[in-house]
Image: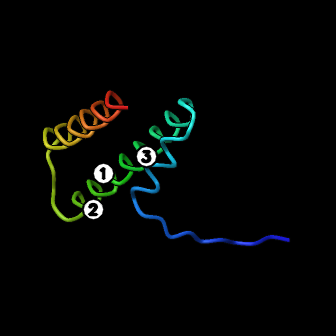
Amino acid sequence: MEMTVQLDLEFAQIKNLVDRLPKKEKAELARYLDDQTLFTEIRRVRRELKEAPITQEELDAEVNAARKTRALRARSH
């Protein structure tokens, strides 16, 4: 028998649950969230590319900015 449950949690409750995770699982969660953020940025850039032409220099700047953001997040975890 399968049952679906939905929980409405406040952000503070989620942080409390994450605090209880072992270090290895926290690192895995951090990588997952970084990937989700990166994919969102890539989708945003793709939408912008469809709406307006972009030069290679502008594209390189967007990629470098996303990489810097990801590196900063990785250092903070």
Residue 71: x %, y % from top left: 30, 30
Quarter occupied by residue 4:
bottom right
Q: What residue is rendered at 46% in x and 49% in y? A: 16
The tag on residue 8 is none
Q: What residue is rendered at 39% in x and 56% in y? A: 12
- Quadrant, the N terminus: bottom right
- 67 shown above or below 50: above
The tag on residue 33 is 3
Which callout, 3 or 2, points at the residue further toward the start of the chain?
3
- 14 shown above or below 55: below
- The span from disc 2 to disc 1 (Cα, nearest Å) is 10 Å
Which of label 3 and label 2 is nearer to you?
A: 3
Residue 21: x %, y % from top left: 56, 39
How crowded pointer 2 is (Cα within 10 Å; few <14, some 14-19, many 20+) is rated as few
Q: What residue is rendered at 30% in x and 51% in y? A: 41
Which of label 3 and label 1 is nearer to you?
A: 3
Residue placed under numbered mark 2 in the picture:
47
Label 2 SS: helix
How crowded pointer 3 is (Cα within 10 Å; few <14, some 14-19, many 20+) is rated as few
Query: Would you say 62 lies left or right of 5 here?
Result: left
The reply to whether dot 2 and dot 1 touch (C-beta < 8 Å) is: no
Which amino acid type is shown beneath numbered disc 2?
Arg
Which of label 2 and label 1 is nearer to you?
A: 1
- 55 shown above or below 64: below
Residue 25: x %, y % from top left: 56, 36
Query: Would you say 37 lies left or right of 63 here?
Result: right
Residue 63: x %, y % from top left: 25, 39
Q: Residue furthest right?
A: 1
Residue placed under numbered mark 1 in the picture:
41
